[in-house]
Image (cartoon, coloured by chain):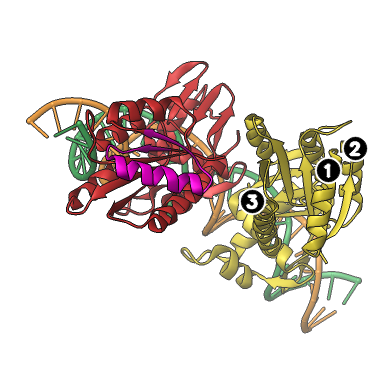
Chain colours: A yellow, B red, C green, D orange
Amino acid sequence: MRKVLVVEDDQAMAIALRDGFEYEGYAVTVARDGTSGLRLASEKGVDLVILDVMLPKMSGLDVCKQLRSTGNGTPIIMLTARGQEIDKVLGLKCGADDYVTKPFSFLELMARVEAVLRRASKKDEQLETYQFGDVLLNFKNFEATKAGKPLDLSSREFKLLKYFIEHRGEAVSRDQLLDSVWSYHGFPLTRTVDMHIAKLRQKIEDSPADPRYIITVHRVGYKFTG
Amino acid sequence: MRKVLVVEDDQAMAIALRDGFEYEGYAVTVARDGTSGLRLASEKGVDLVILDVMLPKMSGLDVCKQLRSTGNGTPIIMLTARGQEIDKVLGLKCGADDYVTKPFSFLELMARVEAVLRRASKKDEQLETYQFGDVLLNFKNFEATKAGKPLDLSSREFKLLKYFIEHRGEAVSRDQLLDSVWSYHGFPLTRTVDMHIAKLRQKIEDSPADPRYIITVHRVGYKFTG
DNA sequence: TAAAAGATGTCAATGAGTTGTAAAATCAGG
DNA sequence: CCTGATTTTACAACTCATTGACATCTTTTA
């Protein structure tokens, strides 16, 4: 059963949402202010957050930003009052997935919910972000950090890492890598792979000479352990 | 309650439309000629305009054109007499959303009305304005400013920016952009994209050579960070 | 165990491929 | 036919992939 967290201080609205979602077969949790909303969203295995913009203690925007900054990617739909047009932009900017302007019909909200959840489940299938050690990878915007500092990786290095991650634990041969990561534009030598591994180690390993994540498997290839 | 403006000089028709719409729960205003129709459509917060093509003082086509030229996007349904086939094309060309040929059943008209309003409300959901840095974009009337000064953006540049904004943070490939922004009328080269990016940077970046908003992702594409 | 053979790590130079940008050619709308 | 927008072309600047050379390490074998 899918779990939805409703963060809404207006009692009538909160009850309407709770009943509506329960009718639709969701497990509903209600929070009445921003801080408890943030806590519940982080703690529980929530599938979806409905977040009012105007809230006591902490605004919906801040809750949203805070959640996203911790890497929490739970789908969020914001509720804004009419006339808070500017909030649409701010809401999306701070990481919400969609917004609905009050007053709205429950049907309308449900349509958005379905859409957002559909998108989210699609996202889950693809590798968007990955973390190992103090390295954070984002394959969507091609950004990476190590220990919080930005890490400059080329597109090939991203592809290489992606392949490794999708085959983590498994020893992969150089030919396998050339097939999948290089896809044969020209026919680079297997040594080219070594080169890239070396560069990658320089960037992601704490001690590149004694690698911890990209391990050499002699006479076979390499193995990623993250 | 939704407000409809009926611009129709034929008394019998005007009354029939007024009664029909009122029965459906609309607030109805009737105008008997083009000029007053135009005035009412601009002044009042009208949700929908029913516009006869043949009108005294100012034709329905001209009213429509005039309205659209002022950036007014109110849904318009044109009424044309049979045999004015040519007007269908003209009507849609001048910015109407749909047309109905006389004689028609009221049911038929209402079906069109519902369809047009549904489409319009969808449009409302879409991005209307966006701001980043000192740049302000208005996608509704295709106006933009940078640091308060008007910014001259072509329609393609608007589309491009819109796509970027809807995918902000994400690295998008040139092919993706060609698919979505160009929609393959002819098959422009990927270099065409670069060209437009360069021009866009000239316009929106503070230092186009060292862009802050449209970032190049080498061997991947571009990424918007606003 | 020591030497040989083979595999891998690393560096620097080269070069293929990508991107920025100006200018010319083309297209579309009035 | 003119004007402005768009697309194409051309070339410079740049990034990064590739390669070969050589050092170092691992495995094999005498």
Residue A210 visible in the picture: no
Between marks 1 and 2, how big is the CA–CA gap? Answer: 20 Å
Kind of residue at badge 1: Ala
According to the picture, the residue beneath numbered tag 3 turns out to be: A140
Asked if residue A211 lies left or right of residue B212, the reply is: right
Secondary element at image label 3? loop
Q: What residue do we see at 46% from left, 25% from top?
A: B144
- Whether residue B18 is in magenta: the answer is yes
Q: Do residues under tags 3 and 1 come within 8 Å of each other at their CB atoms?
A: no
Between marks 3 and 2, how big is the CA–CA gap? Answer: 30 Å
Asked if residue D28 lies left or right of residue A182, the reply is: right
Q: Earlier in the sequence, mark 3 or mark 2?
A: 2
Q: Is residue A151 above or below residue A162?
A: above
**Mark toward the viewer: 3 or 1:** 1
Q: Chain of mark 2?
A: A
- Rendered-image quadrant of the N terminus of chain B: top right
Circle 2: is it few (<14), some (14-19), or many (20+) Cα within 10 Å? Answer: some
Residue A172 at x, y percent in the picture: 70, 71
Are dots 1 and 2 on a single chain?
yes
Q: Earlier in the sequence, mark 1 or mark 2?
A: 1
According to the picture, the residue beneath numbered tag 1 turns out to be: A12
Residue B16 at x, y percent in the picture: 37, 47
Return the residue found at the far top: B148
According to the picture, the residue beneath numbered tag 2 turns out to be: A35
Residue B165 at x, y percent in the picture: 56, 39
Asked if residue A15 lies left or right of residue C25, the reply is: right
Circle 3: is it few (<14), some (14-19), or many (20+) Cα within 10 Å? Answer: some
Observer-nearest residue: D21 or A16? A16
Q: Which mark is residue B152?
A: none
Q: Chain of mark 1?
A: A
Highlighted magenta segment, given as a residue range: B5-30
